[in-house]
Amino acid sequence: MTTLSGVTRVLSVVGARPNFMKLAPVAGALAARGVEHIVVHTGQHYDPDMSDAFFRDLCLPLPDHNLDVGSASHARQTAEIMVRFEPVCAAAQPDIVLVYGDVNSTVAAAMVAAKAGVRVGHVEAGLRSRDRSMPEEINRIVTDHVADSLFAPSRDAVENLRAEGIPRERVQFVGNVMIDSLVAALPAARALCAPARHGVDKQCYTVVTLHRPANVDDRDTLRELLETLAIMSKGGLVLFPVHPRTKARIEELGLESAEMGTLRLLDPMPYLEMLGLVAEADLVITDSGGLQEETTWLGVPCVTVRPNTERPITCTIGTNRLTPAHRETILRAAREARAQRPGTAPTIEHWDGRAADRIAAALCEGARFE
Ligand code: UD1
């Protein structure tokens, strides 16, 4: 059986908001083993709200390199990351390059490292929505197929990789690093008393995030979603931290000052404040991947405005339900989700706060997690 032991220098590449929560526990587990860890930030997300605030909340040291790529079309952004990462990777000579999740930075760095003959590790491997209209699905497939070490968050992810013919010895079932961050941060997040700061009582409000192109780039869809949220807000406060992409579309529609009931459009929130709000919410409405997982672990009802999910366990075991972007189906899903709020949060195998430790044990000590 191939093992990975002997890794002493790791290079991690991150770029977009959800990457940072996945990096933090891995960085901690590698530091605890005295591993040299170089962090490269591609600059895919660059607004302080989308990047710096997360490094601060997650107590991450500043990245060793920032590639400053910024926003562009998919091809341009991916290519620019590749061009700028190649010399950094060559100079660093790491034993392994770790990439996280499914964003453009993930696939770009994975391809550079693989072609340079450097071992690639994919954290959060094996997720599949089977919807190739999502750029993330393309990123997941390509990254998994060039990676040497695939760290899966759930058993369904392991099965997906086997079904695609990826050799068994490359795949390890380590658990969910996003949940590692949640477990570590929850006491500090609760201590912030985020609901009180926003003037709301616990379990009396809804938290919303929407940023997927399918939901926000089409004017009619976005208009219907905002109208739906405005209707919901008549029954209780709706807090909506707005992603820059969504903000731009709302401004294009001229809807930012429209009559919205108690729907509050807010700036993107730092990690701890967001977690503090989500943990005490009555309901979450989202199209984010991470929030489907976080609400499941917390036992908070979640309605995901998407036709599919790469995280099916959040629906089969967790509190999540899918709905298309239509007013009546969202309102019905919200009613059902609230009515079926679980008494206790579900337990999912290896979503236990120790996934990053398993990754570090695999890298440094050759441990195997089947
Ligand atoms: C990216 C990921 C998505 C992830 C999301 C989390 C890809 C293909 N998509 O989507 O999987 O769920 O991050 O947020 O990698 N912008 C800013 N400031 C920033 C970053 C972006 O204003 O700091 C604006 C720009 O107008 C940009 C747009 O947001 O064009 C989209 O940013 P981009 O990184 O391309 O994709 P996201 O929608 O954020």
Image (cartoon, grey):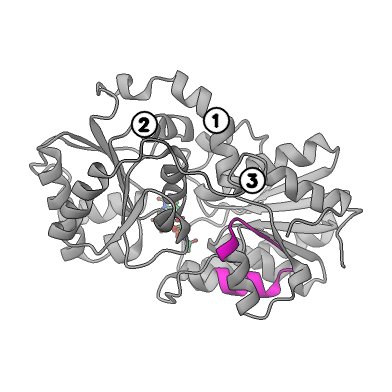
Q: Say the numbered circle drawn on residue 277.
A: 2
Residue 151 in the magenta stretch? The answer is yes
The amino acid type found where label 2 is placed reads: Leu
The amino acid type found where label 1 is placed reads: Ala
- In this view of the protein, which residue sits in the foreground, 276 or 171? 171
User: In what element is the residue under mark 3?
Assistant: helix
Instruction: Check disc 2: other Cα within 10 Å, few if <14, some if 14-19, many if 20+.
Output: many
Real-space CA distance between mark 2 and mark 1, rounded to the nearest whole angstrom: 13 Å
Residue 305 in the magenta stretch? The answer is no
x then y, percent, for residue 297? 47, 42
Tag 2–tag 1 contact (CB < 8 Å): no
Q: Is residue 122 shown above or below 204? A: below
Q: Say the numbered circle drawn on residue 23.
A: 3
Q: Say the numbered circle drawn on residue 185.
A: 1
Splitting the image into 4 quarters, where does residue 295 fall?
top left
- In this view of the protein, which residue sits in the foreground, 288 or 281? 281
Q: Is residue 234 left or right of residue 89?
A: left
Instruction: Check disc 1: other Cα within 10 Å, few if <14, some if 14-19, many if 20+.
Output: some
Q: Quadrant of ligand 1?
A: bottom left
Magenta stretch, residue numbers: 140-156
x then y, percent, for residue 141? 58, 73
